[in-house]
Image (cartoon, grey):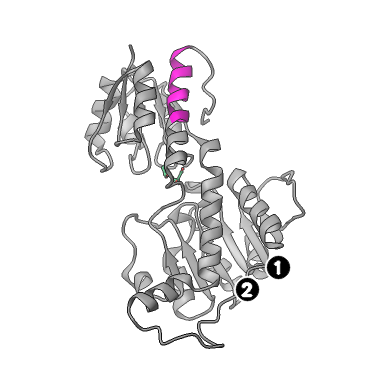
Amino acid sequence: MKRILITRPMPARVVAEAETHFDVEMREENTPLKPGQMRGALALYDGILPTLGDMFSAEVFEDAEGSRCRIVANFGVGYNHIDVAAARAAGIAVTNTPGAVTDATADIAMMLILMSARRAGEGERMLRAGRWTGWNPTQMLGTHVTGKTVGIVGMGRIGQAIARRCHHGFGMEVLYYNRSAKAVDIPSRQVESIEALASEADFLVAAVPGGAETRKIIGPEVLAAMKPTAHLINIARGDVVDEAALIDALRERRISGAGLDVYEREPEVPEVLRKMENVTLLPHLGTAALEVREAMGLLAVENLRAFFAGEDPPNPVN
Ligand code: 8YV
């Protein structure tokens, strides 16, 4: 039996499935692996099932050529923590779990759009603090979502799932920016730059993969192009947005609000952001539902199973 390392505790179904195929070791800590532990794992296991935070950098793969590990099967769609080119150079395959995360992540985007627009976090904080003095006609007026314009940066699987929710659920106009042309199954319009998208959107939503190519693509220029009434939503990766520029824009009220599920240096969230009322801050809840984490884990295990059976794994990352 092939030896597999699962780098975090996982739902029981995932572990049970993995154990039907492999000799499984599961770490009990929820902390990311350290570089030395990753090098050790490459030497000791045939396959590794890592996740967010396990920084499989080029240095980690440096001496991995000819090591025991043949595949790194990531739990999660985002693999910006894995240097895929360095893995390939060491002859190690990389897979991820795209299909399993789409709807849950799109749901979180909708939640953040609604929470930010309707000031849900602020209202809850007020009530819990005993500061609610009763309903009145002008209390806590937010932004109406139905019929507004959403601007989606990155029209991949998750971007399109957000677009469908906005169109079918909220009658919104859908605009998007994407490097290549996309066949989208709802009425929508592709816009030629992120700035142009930002200038038209009531809700600008980041849904691009993380990594060097998208680092800070939502920076001062894009934020300056947004309407003062608009909200920025980020369910992608923290470093897609220039956090310092976002803080300035929010502090100076150049945009109305932001809804964030991801941060530049997770789990660190700048104190200034935590103190602002016009920001909704979630602790990377994108896929945090038992069924979804099970589906992600089962897909990662299927990638491993197929790979070692000599079949094409369903989700290779190139
Ligand atoms: C995951 C995510 O739960 O799938 C992803 O890339 O961003 C999350 O929702 C987490 O990152 C594990 O990979």
Write the residue at 43% across / 22% down: 304
Mark 1 = which residue?
147
Q: Residue 47: where, in percent of width, then height?
A: 36, 22
Above-or-below relation of 7 to 186? above
Q: Is residue 76 magenta?
A: no
Of the residues shown, which amino acid type is indicated by label 2? His
Q: CA distance from mark 1 to mark 2?
A: 8 Å
Write the residue at 47% across / 29% down: 299
Mark 2 = which residue?
144
Query: Mark 2: which secondary structure?
Result: loop
Q: Is residue 307 magenta?
A: yes
How dense is the environment of label 1, judged by Cα within 10 Å: few (below 14), some, or many (20 and up)?
few
Q: Residue 147: where, in percent of width, then height?
A: 70, 68
Of the residues shown, which amino acid type is indicated by label 1? Gly
Which residue occupies the extreme front position in the image? 134
What is the magenta range?
298-309
- Side (left or right) of 95 relative to 26: right
Which residue occupies the extreme right position in the image? 187
Predominant secondary structure in magenta?
helix
Above-or-below relation of 293 to 271? above
Cβ atoms at labels 1 and 2 below 8 Å apart? yes
- Which quadrant would residue 16 be assigned to in this image? top left
